[in-house]
Image (cartoon, grey):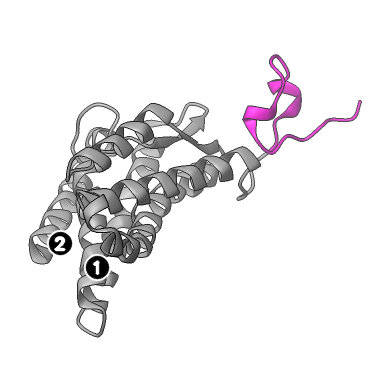
Amino acid sequence: MDRKVYYSFHDIPFGQYEYGYTQPTIRFSKTEIIHLLISIVVLSLAFSFAYTYPFYTHLIQFIKIFPVSLLAVVTAFAFHEIAHKFTGMKYGYWSEYRMFPQGLLFALFLGLFTPFVFAAPGAVQIFGMPSKEEGGKIAMAGPSTNIIISAIFYLLSFLAFKNIFLMISGINAFLALFNLIPLGPLDGKKVFYWDIKIWSILLIISIAMFIAII
């Protein structure tokens, strides 16, 4: 009997998981790409609205800030989620990003009507039962990526485009710090319960980066 290979667990018909599973490869499904792109655009708009609040009185500034917000969202949010995905797939689990429409709409609403943005755009879904260590390492991948990117752009800010690179560095540092809070569905909770020493090191680095930038 021929076995059909599915590259996205969301595409596997109910009841056929035992027949269609294969070791995942590093790739993105069409649905995942669409969800990532929608999330990136909406978050970029939300941050641009917030930075130029109220945007309708600062249209020129809004147009100028949008590309910067786009770059910041790609480096901070997209790379964070992709790091989770790649680490999950490294351990053999189907890992795909799925947006949270209500969270994206809420972020857009805040950006439009306040100078603040709080976003819960979505998350990488892991299909399987990772061990405590695997779960901790998968969770750690996101904040660790943000810390590395924050450090790179912080150093680049001394060479050129100081304000732009500091903004990108700061957003990455904040995202790392926020996600390391050991509560609820945040990455910090999984890392904390896996290895409190590693969690402490990441937290201290992210705090130091954030303080240095602001």
| Residue occupied by mark 2 | 209
Residue 162: percent from the left, percent from the top? 21, 77
| Distance from Cα at disc 1 to Cα at disc 2 | 7 Å
The amino acid at mark 2 is Met
Residue 8 painted magenta: yes
Check contact, mark 1 vs mark 2: CB within 8 A: yes
| Residue occupied by mark 1 | 151
**Mark 1 or 2, nearer chain start:** 1
Q: Secondary structure at mark 1?
A: helix
Residue 48: percent from the left, percent from the top? 29, 53
Residue 114: percent from the left, percent from the top? 18, 40
Q: Residue furthest bottom?
A: 159
The residue closer to the viewer here, 157 or 40, is 40
Q: For the C terminus, give its image quadrant.
A: bottom left
Tell whether 7 sits left or right of 3: left
The amino acid at mark 1 is Ala
Residue appearing at x 70%, y 30% in the figure: 21
Secondary structure mostly seen in magenta is loop
Q: Using a 10 Å C-alpha cutoff, classify the residue at mark 1 as few (fewer than 14 neighbours), some (14 to 19) or many (20 or more).
A: many
Q: Does 136 sit above or below residue 27?
A: above
The residue closer to the viewer here, 170 or 199, is 170
Q: Secondary structure at mark 2?
A: helix
Tell whether 172 sits left or right of 88: left
Residue 188 painted magenta: no
Quadrant location of residue 207? Answer: bottom left
The residue closer to the viewer here, 4 or 47, is 47
Residue appearing at x 60%, y 50% in the figure: 26
Which numbered circle lies on residue 204? Answer: none
Residue appearing at x 30%, y 54% in the figure: 144
Range drawn in magenta = 1-22
